[in-house]
Amino acid sequence: MKVTVFAPINVALIKYWGKEDNQLRLPANDSLSVCLTNLGTTTTVEWDKNLNQDLADSRMKRQLDKVRKIAQINWRAKVVTKNNFPSGAGLSSSASGLAALTLAATAAAGLKLPEKDLSRLARLGSGSACRSIPDGWVEWSKGDDKTSYAKTIFPTDYWNLRILVVIVSDKKKLVSSTAGQELAFTSPFYKARVKSMAAKIKKIKAAIKQKNFTELGKIMEADCLNMHRVMRTQQPELNYLLPETKTVMQAVKKWREEGLESYFTINTGQNALVFCEPKNENKLVERLEKIEGVIEVRRDKIGKGARLLT
Ligand code: PMV
């Protein structure tokens, strides 16, 4: 059977950086994210008895092996996958990519896994991929191999926020999230960060419940800066930000002080994600596009998780 799926990228408001178990991809802390509507990966998988090797890259092959084991098949797969945004540039292409592959490969093998099992399996491919399976506002609990998966905590249409994807460069990062996270523990700030995470999750959930945008934005931005502080103080140090990224960060802060409210978050890459309320979207896009070094601003909103297209 041939199956095509779409999986969105997810943006963590409270991030994870560092794992308790690198093999099983168990995070050191819980994290909280939203799925986007437009940015994501479209993947087609077809299992074929007559192929003698998988038509896929090595990370995908390892994920296909897991699906073969569950489905008890020994066929090879043809995989065609496409991101509609720059890959490896801080926009979570591994999250949408591994989530899409997991859903497509299982469905094409005739498996209908419950959402939590799909999320768990996606986690084994790339930690944050588990958060691209459920819809809307999503929490990933650290747990153990069985209990570490992501689930929806508020539905897609719960709160109409906008996410502006600010692209300053499509250059691929030199150090992957997986490799970078393995050395998170070398930062003197790492332990304190991990210790502070449960309280942050509690606080941001209260802000979401009250639909308090200012509180949500403050917690999200502070967590992003805290994570990048850990990265910068790891050994060897990691800096994913470009001068243009910093210009965007400073502009967002300045406009906020002037009354135009938005908050940024940044992953392992140079591109920024700016959260705002719909009333400020047009003005912010107009201003962001004028910043020297900004190539493109993509508009997005909170969306559904991975789903079958055909
Ligand atoms: O799961 P990975 O290896 O793609 O790590 C992603 C880590 C961050 O994007 C930096 C944070 C997060 O929680 O998404």
Image (cartoon, helix red, strand yellow):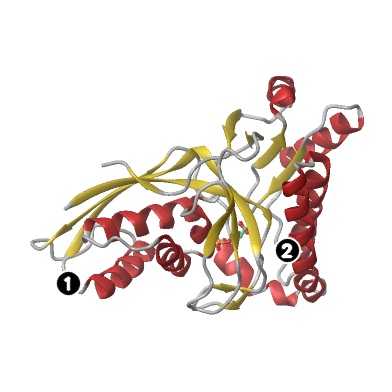
Between 291 and 68, the one lying in front of the other is 68
- Residue at the disc numbered 1: 74
- Residue at the disc numbered 2: 231
Is 253 left or right of 279, judged from the image as shown? right
**In the rendered image, which quarter contains the C terminus?**
top left
Check the image and report above or below for 115 versus 71: above
Residue 222 x/y as whole percent: 81, 53
Where, by quadrant of the figure, is residue 293 drawn?
Answer: top right
Say what amino acid the circle numbered 1 marks.
Asn
Check the image and report above or below for 74 versus 128: below
Check the image and report above or below for 17 versus 45: below
Say which element carries label 2.
helix
Residue in view at x 66 percent, y 41 percent? 273
Tell how many labels.
Answer: 2
Residue 100 seen in this snapshot = yes
Residue 306 x/y as whole percent: 42, 49
Q: Nearer the viewer, mark 2 or mark 1?
A: 1
Between 68 and 173, the one lying in front of the other is 68
Dot 1 crowding, Cα within 10 Å, few <14, some 14–19, many 20+ = few
Dot 2 crowding, Cα within 10 Å, few <14, some 14–19, many 20+ = many
First along the sequence among labels 2 and 1: 1
Residue 247 x/y as whole percent: 78, 36
Is 221 left or right of 132, judged from the image as shown? right
Residue in view at x 16 percent, y 53 percent? 1
Say what amino acid the circle numbered 2 marks.
Met
Mark 1 within 8 Å of ligand 1, using the beta carbon: no
Residue placed furthest toward the right: 257
Residue 21 x/y as whole percent: 56, 80
Check the image and report above or below for 249 versus 30: above
Residue placed furthest toward the left: 50
